[in-house]
Image (tube, rainbow, N blue to C red):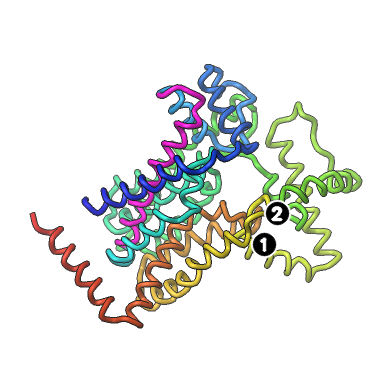
């Protein structure tokens, strides 16, 4: 308990200091149009019955802004940032618990320490955006899933389903995880069909959380929208000029003109959002078809470029070097950590790699931005911490034995009543 309190307080102090020292980040379009506007509709009593409530992003983050505004007043911006600072401090604690269980206590400490000081964990707490809340919910879901696989208690399975549902209502990227989860639970099964019972409990609780929002969309908008509609990310990731905002603004008029010439015409505004969003997906698919027909080899190089951009790129096109430089200090030891963990048969390596791979695949196929990868950086950092300690073990075995002796001492003290 002392370790968790210390980790939380350290992370909280660093984030509050950043909140005090750093200049106010600007409010991007998503923050103004989706999150703050959605919260305002809720506070003004129109709420989800208003057909203009944004559906290209899920509603839970707007609900959190509305909650802190209702409780503490103001415009909700300062309140949501303070909530994010507290949430991300809890994320550091969850990382410690998860990585401790996956590897050992020193690796858990080191992982939590890196996250506490990690600039790309600190900065999202200071702007209006769902990354911090989403990262916390995903980390909590992973921790509950690990306990569910180990103990097979219904409380953990139900808790995992509820938290995964809230994560999906924060950012829709996790909506496909329940489709893949059975394979993971089956691989970890202990006996009989217990894994199937646990999966059904998780799935039921997940559906109970997200289904009211899908029902609302059907009743109010008369369309089937389980989570959200945002096919523009598919379009933005379909060619080089669309990857960044500045070049996108220049390229989009030409792209729309070409699409119209090929018979791909946007639907009028009186049609539902899901129908209108299908236009962007069609234009994106046409982009890929044209490239495959005219220059198939360029599609290979473009997809390779998209894969690498996942690990450093920004939508503005700025600060790529800084982002990559900072993260290379994590990526290199993380590769060592993955190899070392695999060789030592660390069973949770599969779970963490599975989750990282899921995020990589979805954002590689859509829009490759580093901020989309931040929610899985806790697990990359976990591998990096394990890799660093593995290097210490190989190069400085006496220091490593000292760390292990501290771990054993703390374990023995924790067992004393």
Disc 1 target residue: 306
Q: Judge by depth and name the residue closer to the eye, 21 or 303.
A: 21
- Quadrant of the rendered image containing residue 310: bottom right
- As drawn, the residue found furthest toward the left would be 417
Does residue 167 appear in the picture of this structure? no
- Quadrant of the rendered image containing residue 221: top right
Give whichever of discs 2 and 1 has the lower sequence position: 2
Disc 2 target residue: 237
- Residue 338 x/y as whole percent: 44, 72
Tell me the residue at 63%/53% (across/down): 314
Mark 2 in CB contact with mark 1 (< 8 angstroms): yes
Question: With 27 as the anchor, is 144 left or right in this view?
Answer: left
Range shown magenta: 72-101
The secondary structure that most of the magenta stretch takes on is: helix
Q: Residues within 10 Å of mark 2 (few under 14, many from 20)?
A: many
Report the Cα–Cα distance between label 2 and label 1: 8 Å
Tell me the residue at 48%/23% (across/down): 74
| Secondary structure type for disc 2 | loop
The label on residue 33 is none
């Amino acid at each position: 308990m002392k370790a968790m309190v210390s980790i939380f307080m350290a992370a909280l102090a660093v984030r509050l200091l950043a909140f005090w020292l750093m200049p106010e980040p600007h409010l991007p379009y998503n923050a103004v149009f989706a999150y703050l506007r959605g919260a305002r509709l809720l506070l003004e009593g129109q709420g989800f019955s208003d057909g203009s409530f944004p559906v290209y992003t899920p509603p839970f983050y707007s609900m959190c802004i509305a909650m802190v505004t209702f409780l503490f007043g103001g415009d909700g911006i300062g309140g949501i940032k303070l909530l994010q600072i507290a949430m991300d401090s809890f994320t550091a604690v969850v990382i410690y618990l998860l990585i401790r269980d996956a590897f050992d206590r020193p690796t858990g400490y080191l992982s939590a320490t890196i996250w506490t000081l990690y600039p790309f964990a600190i900065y999202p707490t200071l702007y209006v955006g769902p990354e911090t809340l989403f990262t916390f919910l995903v980390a909590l879901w992973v921790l509950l899933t690990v306990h569910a696989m180990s103990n097979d208690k219904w409380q953990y399975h139900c808790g995992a389903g509820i938290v995964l549902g809230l994560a999906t209502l924060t950012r829709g990227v996790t909506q496909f995880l329940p489709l893949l989860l059975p394979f993971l639970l089956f691989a970890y099964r202990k006996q009989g069909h217990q894994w199937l019972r646990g999966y059904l409990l998780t799935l039921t609780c997940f559906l109970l959380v997200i289904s009211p929002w899908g029902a609302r969309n059907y009743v109010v908008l008369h369309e089937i929208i389980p989570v959200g509609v945002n096919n523009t990310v598919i379009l933005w990731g379909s060619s080089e000029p669309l990857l960044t905002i500045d070049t996108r603004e220049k390229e989009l008029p030409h792209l729309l003109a070409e699409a119209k010439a090929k018979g791909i015409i946007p639907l009028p505004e009186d049609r539902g959002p899901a129908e209108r969003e299908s236009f962007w997906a069609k234009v994106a698919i046409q982009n890929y078809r044209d490239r495959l027909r005219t220059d198939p080899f360029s599609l290979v190089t473009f997809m390779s470029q998209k894969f690498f951009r996942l690990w450093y790129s920004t939508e503005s096109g700025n600060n790529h070097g800084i982002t990559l430089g900072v993260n290379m200090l994590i990526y290199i030891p993380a590769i060592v950590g993955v190899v070392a963990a695999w060789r030592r048969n660390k069973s949770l390596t599969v779970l963490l790699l599975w989750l990282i791979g899921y995020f990589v695949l979805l954002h590689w196929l859509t829009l490759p931005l580093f901020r989309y990868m931040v929610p899985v950086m806790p697990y990359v950092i976990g591998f990096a911490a394990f890799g660093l300690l593995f290097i210490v073990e190989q190069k400085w075995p006496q220091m490593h034995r000292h760390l292990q002796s501290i771990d054993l001492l703390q374990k023995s003290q924790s067992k004393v009543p």
